[in-house]
Image (spheres, rainbow, N blue to C red):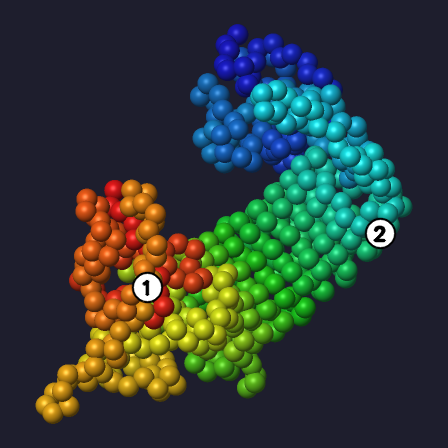
Amino acid sequence: MQTTKSSDLPPQPTREESQPGATDSASAFKCGQRVHSTGDTRRIGTVKYVGPVEGYSGTWVGVDWDDDGQGKHDGSHNGVQYFQARGLKTASFVRPHNLSSGITLLEALQVRYRGTSTKEEEDEMYVLSSTNKRVSIELLGKEKIQNKLSRFEELTGVSLSFLGVSSPGPSGQISNTLPNLKQLDLTGNLLSDWKDVGIICKELPALEVLNLSHSSMLHDTVEIPKLHNIRILVLNHIGINWKQVEMLKDSVPCIEELHLIGNNIKEITLSSSMRVEGFDYLHLLNLEENCLADWNEIMKLSKIKSLEQLLLNKNSLNEIWYPEHSTSDGAGNESVGRNFKPFQSLHCLLLGGNNIKDLASVDSLNSFPSLIDIRLSENPVSDTGKDGVPRFVLIARLANVKILNGSEVSPRERKDSEIRYVRLVMTKYNDNVEELMRLHPRFAELKRFHGIEDVKAPIGVFGPQKMSSGLISVTLKCVGSSIGEKQPLTKKLPSTTTVGKLKNLCESFFKLKSVKPKLFLQEEGTPLPTLLDDDMASLMEIGVGNDSTILVDEVN
């Protein structure tokens, strides 16, 4: 008999200790069934084959594991393809007694809240003393807490994540056991049939929050009853597409939050209308970590009137736009009423980690009627290392933003940013007014609002322009390890001072003999300082405004 690695197709498998849901009979398993490895409820997979394997005795179960690298092959062995796995190393052949078909919800409840700690678990509860010896930890009030959690009828929130739940259990038992349950976390279990989910929810009339993340649900959502009490539904990483979401929405008519992270959604697939309809109470839609690349797909969500927060971080979007005419859907289709405004209630739009490059996309955000909270971090347009613009430029271009990249925009920061922005633009454009207005649509408005006059060259009898009119106050702080402790210096410098000139001045100010300085601009609301690496750029051109702080580091 041929042998392979001990973890797959062992010639003489050893019987493991019996676990809940484990079985010796291969007949207990069928293709498409969700299982987990006996003794490891986090190693979850789908049965793809039940039967003999050439060269080995008995019946084997072919499993395609959810996580990459947990298997040994692609469903084939010795040149025979028994089933097709997701990847090259996601599949295993397993003896039936090494697999569990799961337990009921109430059995999982007993395990989680009435199970006793094993000696091994208690041995792991320790801290290290000053002499590096283990000191056991005793949890004060542990028995009191356990006693409270064991009174199931009083529980309002339950977490049964990764416990192998595969079925609701006998009818009526859940409702009798958990009459007051409002929140249920079933992350990473073996449930796959929406009908079972419907049964669980029906037996929990007070349930408002349901988390089914990291489950592998069947595509058929037709048999779910109406669940009027569900307010928050979390379906992260379950492989759902928008067509299924459309079928599901009628079952949760009062839903307020819908989380769909990491489902590989590429498009908002609709059967009839041009836009998503329904979801009358939906306030938050989370579509982070999907594969949305076309803004036209996002516009299909614009008719959800109650939508206040749209989370689109870590997709593949490369542009943003807002339709010029509110009665149009953006593609020229006059499909809605005269008073319709796309995304009329949206006040939070998170777009971090996409591929947005152009400032026209940033400017389009001003057209959203209620938008005040925006995230653009981790996009080329906001990465100064990739020809993006600094925070102050984004603030100046976004007229209504109050929170940018998670940081509040204070009135002072807004004023300083807008003034710096206007002065920066004035250094770049002289006579080409048309190009200036096209590239900087808020320039004229901001220049007028802040009373900033044009800078004129000194001529004739008026004499030279006063030096003080172009001075800015800059605080210089040394942060280099070999520079030593030095008091920060505040200097008034001409706004035309170049970065290269400022480096020379720093060498003089701080008496740096053998150290070459490297400068960073530290800005309010920005987590990391910006490297000033263009020696020919002036302080005004790079956005250094009055009362700015520049960090003086050393070149490695």
Residue 270 percent location from the top left of the image: 55, 64
- Residue under numbered circle 1: 490
In this view, the mark in front (1 or 2): 1
* Three-letter amino acid code at the position of disc 1: Thr
Q: Give the side of residue 467 with respect to residue 305, left or right.
A: left
Residue 132 quadrant: top right
Q: Is residue 504 above or below residue 337?
A: above
Residue 147 percent location from the top left of the image: 85, 37
Q: Name the residue at the top extreme.
A: 1
Q: Give the side of residue 51 with respect to residue 184, left or right.
A: left
Image quarter (top left, top right, bottom left or bottom right) of the C terminus:
top left
- Residue under numbered circle 2: 180
Q: Which residue is drawn at 61% across and 43% down?
A: 214
Q: In this view, does 292 lie above or below 397?
A: above
- Whole-angstrom CA distance, mark 1 to mark 2, is 63 Å
* Three-letter amino acid code at the position of disc 2: Asn
Q: Residue at x 68, y 27 (%)?
A: 125
**Of the pair 341 and 128, the residue shown nearer to us:** 128
Residue count near mark 1 (Cα–Cα under 10 Å), binned few <14, some 14–19, many ≥20 = some
Residue 79 quadrant: top left
Q: Which residue is drawn at 70% across and 48% down?
A: 194
Q: Name the residue at the left extreme.
A: 460
Residue 134 visible in the displayed image: yes
Q: Is mark 2 on a helix, strand or loop?
A: loop
